Amino acid sequence: MRGLVFGHLVWVAWHPSRPALAGAVAAAAALAITGSPASEWSRPHRATEVALAALVLAAFGLVTASFARLALHTEAAIARGDVAGRRFRYVNTVPVDEIRDSYIEYLRVPGFTERKRALHEFLVNAGALTQGHC
C-alpha cells in the first residue's frame, strides 16, 4: 500500500497541474513531519497511521482538484461551442433494427410529428436508416 501511495505521489509530482504538485508537496511535508520521532506518539504505529491519513486526505484533495479542473475545462469547451472531432456510434443492448421496425409502424400513427422527426434523425445517425428511407 505504501509503495502504491508513494508511486502515485511520484507520478503526481511530474503532472503538469499546479494543484496536483502542491498536494504532492503537502503530502511529502506531512510524511516528513509525522515521521519524525516525537514524545507525544504513545504507540509505535501512531506516526504511520497519521501519515497514511494525511496521504489519503491529500489523494482525495488531488482527485477532487483534478475533477474540478476537468469540469471547468469541459464547461468552457461547451460554452465555446467546441464539438468532438468525430461522431460517436450509438451503442446499447437494444437492437437498432427493432427500433427501426417500430419506427416504421409508428409512421402509421397520426400526429407526433416532432417525435417522429427526432426518432428518424436518431435512426439516421445510428446508421439504421438512410436519409431518403421512410
Image (cartoon, rainbow, N blue to C red):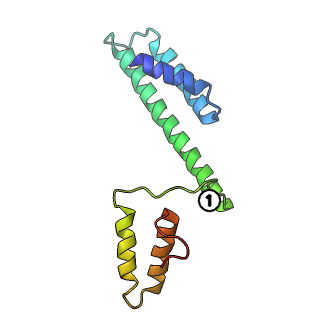
Judging depth in this view, the residue of 74 and 59 nearest the camera is 74
Q: Looking at the picture, does residue 60 appear above or below residue 27?
A: below
Provide residue 122's location: percent of width, then percent of height. 48, 69
Mark 1, Cα crowd under 10 Å, few <14 / some 14-19 / many 20+, is few
**For the N terminus, which image quadrant?**
top left
* Label 1: element kind: helix
**Residue depicted at x 34% and y 61%:** 94
Judging depth in this view, the residue of 41 and 62 nearest the camera is 62
Judging depth in this view, the residue of 49 and 132 nearest the camera is 132
Q: Looking at the picture, does residue 4 appear above or below residue 113?
A: above
Provide residue 127's location: percent of width, then percent of height. 49, 63
Residue on which disc 1 sits = 78
Provide residue 40's location: percent of width, then percent of height. 38, 14
Q: Amino acid at mark 1?
A: Ile
Q: Looking at the picture, does residue 51 appear above or below residue 80?
A: above
- The single residue placed furthest to the right in the displayed view is 80
Judging depth in this view, the residue of 90 and 71 nearest the camera is 90
**Residue depicted at x 36% and y 73%:** 101
How many marks the image carries: the answer is 1
**Residue depicted at x 43% and y 10%:** 38
Q: Looking at the picture, does residue 133 appear above or below residue 61?
A: below
Provide residue 6's location: percent of width, then percent of height. 48, 19
Residue 99, quarter of picture: bottom left
- The single residue placed furthest to the bottom in the displayed view is 110
Residue 53, quarter of picture: top left
